[in-house]
Amino acid sequence: VKVIARDFLRSGANTDDNNPKGIKKINTFCIGVDSGAPNVVISEPDNESWVTVGKDITVSATVSKKEGVTVTGKIYKENAEQTEENLICSVENISIADTADSEGKYAISGTFKLPNDAQGRYTVVIKAEDKYKQSTEPSVTVGVDSIAPVWEENNTESPFLVNKKSYSY
């Protein structure tokens, strides 16, 4: 882009006879024309789903553009400030497909593994940032319940009685 600024004096008759007084030139500079921040849609894990600790959990998503885009994934305790101090784990082995699908979107995949002592709800954040530092950070919430239910027999108060004995499979 080349910008030239001119000062003009108008004649007393206020006609279109403009007389340039001076020309000021600035150095050439570049501007980037871009379609905006990359759009990411997370398809796996499902929002509000339950996952298992100690196993690889697959993350699948799509991104609206690939060139110059960096994708990262981080997992935080739900409602925790998203800082490095609160980081539980990261999405590993993130890859972006080489070709777009029929809608012009590129598939993203990766995995993460929650620590064995994980319990409660977590936020999975996938961030896509382009070369102009425009980014988007959609998230889903997953839960972990590693405490197995316990059956306690109560032959007098249990709602599941058969012949006055607790019924279970």
Image: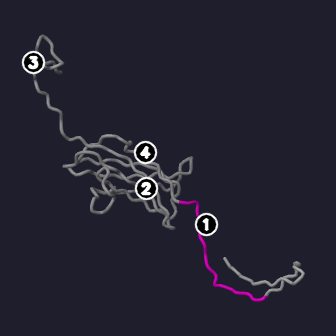
Depth check, mark 4 against mark 3: the one in front is 3
Dot 1: few (<14), some (14–19), or many (≥20) neighbours within 10 Å? few
Vertical comparison of 63 with 67: above or below: above
Residue range in magenta is 21-36
Q: Position of residue 167 (x, y in %)?
A: 15, 18
Provide the secondary structure element on which disc 3 rests: loop
Dot 3: few (<14), some (14–19), or many (≥20) neighbours within 10 Å? some
Q: Amino acid at mark 4?
A: Ser
Q: Amino acid at mark 3?
A: Asn
Where is mark 3, residue-wise? 155
Instruction: Name the disc covering residue 43, or none.
Output: 4
Instruction: Name the disc covering residue 137, or none.
Output: 2
Provide the secondary structure element on which disc 1 rests: loop
Q: Are marks 4 and 3 in contact (CB under 8 Å)?
A: no
The span from disc 1 to disc 3 (Cα, nearest Å) is 74 Å
Q: Amino acid at mark 1?
A: Val
Left or right of residue 21: residue 3: left
Q: Residue at x 51, y 67 (%)?
A: 132
The span from disc 4 to disc 3 (Cα, nearest Å) is 46 Å
Farthest-out residue, bottom? 22
Q: Amino acid at mark 2?
A: Glu
Quadrant showing the N terminus: bottom right
Where is mark 1, residue-wise? 33
